[in-house]
Amino acid sequence: MQDKPGSGPSKKVPRKAGRAEDAQSAEEAELAKRLRSLDERLDRKHETQAAARVAEQSRKSGIGAALRMSTDFVAAVLVGAGLGFGIDWIFGIAPWGMIVFLLLGFCAGVLNVMRSAGKIADPHARHDPPGRPEMYDDDEDK
Amino acid sequence: MANDPIHQFQISKLIPLEVAGHDLSFTNSSLFMVATVAAATGFLVWATSSRGLVPSRAQSIAEMSYEFVANTLRDAAGTSGMKFFPLVFSLFMFVLVANLFGMFPYFFTVTSHIVVTFALSMLVIGLVLVYGFYKHGLKFLGLFVPDGVPGVLMPLVVAIEVISFLSRPISLSVRLFANMLAGHITLKVFAGFVTSLSALGAIGIGGAILPLAMTVALTGLEFLVAFLQAYVFAVLTCMYLNDALHPTH
């Protein structure tokens, strides 16, 4: 509470550095400060750019999203029907494969639509793939 | 015939060729695929031939397309996904150039045939399967098993996940094909209104202004769709490749 974690130990470091080293470290500190400020500015720029891109997409891609989700849904139903038909044909269990897999196809279609709408997370997205921001940060090995 | 909106998608044999009972003729579709590949390759090779530190216009277009695809891939699949960059970049350039070629009058749109887009998406999904099993072995099947699902529900959930996975190549190919087909048909229908209305005399010519304006607007929209669909194809390819790279941990 009384002092910041960084400031405590730095006071105890013995100051035996010469003039030249002192100047050098001051220069380095200056450089580090400039680097940090550059990083901050870049971060801010990237953030605003990303936000702008998301806003742009959500504004004009209403019809695109509709097309995407409808194809996602229909494709899953078609695959379900195809699988059911194939299973019926192979095993000769006339309507049952079609009934079961068509219904499963509808479920998969709804799942596809919810996923592309971002309503539910991709099951793999939870496992922090590199390059993607970590949405769930619950590592058990603490 | 001139106003038939479907006529533009007809396949015609340019060089008939039959090998062992299979029809392998060189069609107008093949011609435009060759032209697409030649144009994309030729442009990139020509644009990057001088390689100035200060890029010329052509070079900066080539660099921008590289950066664009590279960033898309890195965002979706991480740095380890960059080993698939040649594939994704080729797919993106092929689809983009084919779509843009389709915007020339009297040109054939390669991507408006589902057999082409389906072949492309099967290439992607086939690669995902082969690479996934090659890299992770049977652990790749963990892709279909979400964690935290009770054992009783597991068969149902796995079946749904498998169907969802199998529907990907279909929705990937149908999306591209349907967008290009529908766009070109709409364009042709509205352009057809212009000619048939203007045959009706002075009033018709006055009325033909409306579909003409619509045709102009639709042409702009079609250029947008051409870019957007190539981008969507590339993005989804990256996302599926990400599944092959990192199924589950």
Image (cartoon, helix red, strand yellow):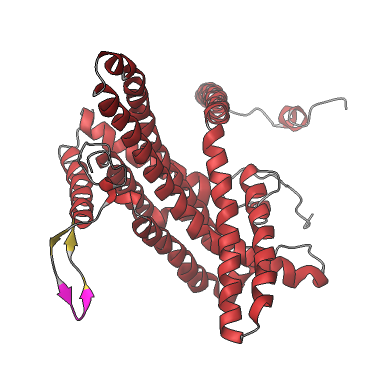
Indicate left or right for B46 with B187 as reference. left
Give the quadrant of the N terminus of chain B.
top left
Q: Quadrant of residue A88?
A: bottom right
Q: Quadrant of residue B225?
A: top left
> Which residue sits furthest right?
A1
Q: Residue at x 72, y 47 (%)?
A: A136
Question: Residue B199: horizontal and vertical position, in percent?
Answer: 23, 24
Q: Residue at x 55, y 57 (%)?
A: A75
B26 vs B199: above or below: below
Q: Would residue B209 be visible to someone looking at this image?
A: yes
Which residue is more in the foreground, A138 or B66? B66
Which residue is more in the foreground, B195 or A4? B195
SS assignment for the magenta stretch, majority: strand
Which residue is more in the foreground, A122 or A77? A77
Residue range in magenta is B18-22
Indicate left or right for B95 with A54 as reference. left
Indicate left or right for B119 with A26 as reference. left
Which residue is more in the foreground, B15 or B141? B15
Q: Would residue B249 be visible to someone looking at this image?
A: no
Indicate left or right for A108 with B29 as reference. right
Q: Residue at x 82, y 72 (%)?
A: B152
Q: Quadrant of residue B139?
A: bottom right
